[in-house]
Image: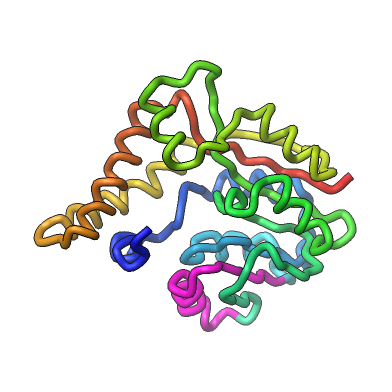
Amino acid sequence: MDWAAFFTLHDDSPRGGPSDGDSLDWALALAGVPADGAICDAGCGPGADIAALLAHVPRGRVEAVDLHPHYAERATARFADERRARVRQGDMGALTGPFDLIWSAGALHFLGVTEGLSRWRAALAPGGAVAFSEACWFTATPSARARAFWDREYPRITDAAGIAAQVQAAGYAILGQRPLSDAAWEGYFQPMERQIATLRPGASAAIADVLAAAEDEIATWRACRAEYGYLLTVARPR
């Protein structure tokens, strides 16, 4: 991955991946996060979900963590004046807590579902929960186009039953699961398309490769969105 070219594309993107406020609201209500609770946004990207998380804990706090300094710097600047939010660059696999909720929008796959949940158990407060979105097949017979994309991007993709098995293998009970909406995906892709159009003229070879990969990701999802998406799972240690 040419990270400089990647961040050239994503520098002005409000999100690091698909997510939306309705899904976040559903997950936090299901988890029963208290108004004075502590939440960790694990793999926070540029910080798109921090404000909504703060709104759910009006007397609480949010700690946001991302491995990439570029994202951590953007999120830090975005919430520099918010006393209840702390953003840091670091390893989301080494959280300390205690947190009433660990929220992870499309980032847990970097650790692996079972491995990540196992590592996060010690960072949860009593009664705490994890809410995460993970790539998921919605069909048992994906098309060649969808299969080729995920074989390249994330060969470990599985279906809802496979995700449930990974959650249970970490010693968690599932409180609920639901797919992210099309609006969550378009909220990520449409700003990216505008940036692609801006960057296309005069793009270097490295940036042109990143733009082409992004266009393929967008076109593949729009053509095959009935076949796959992100599944949002809320789970609590047993």
Q: Position of residue 211 (x, y in %)?
A: 25, 51
Q: Quadrant of residue 58?
A: bottom right
Residue numbers of the magenta segment: 61-82
Q: Residue furthest top?
A: 141
Which residue does the image show at 68% across and 64% down from the upper left? 40
Q: Position of residue 28 (x, y in %)?
A: 70, 51
Q: Is residue 79 magenta?
A: yes
Q: Position of residue 112 (x, y in %)?
A: 65, 48
Which residue does the image show at 49% across and 69% down from the upper left? 68
Which residue does the image show at 66% across and 69% down from the upper left? 62
Using the image, determine if residue 217 lies above or below residue 25. Answer: above
- The residue lying toward the viewer, choosing from 188 and 84, is 188
- The residue lying toward the viewer, choosing from 134 and 62, is 134
Q: Is residue 65 left or right of residue 168?
A: left
Q: Quadrant of the C terminus?
A: top right
Q: Position of residue 214 (x, y in %)?
A: 31, 47
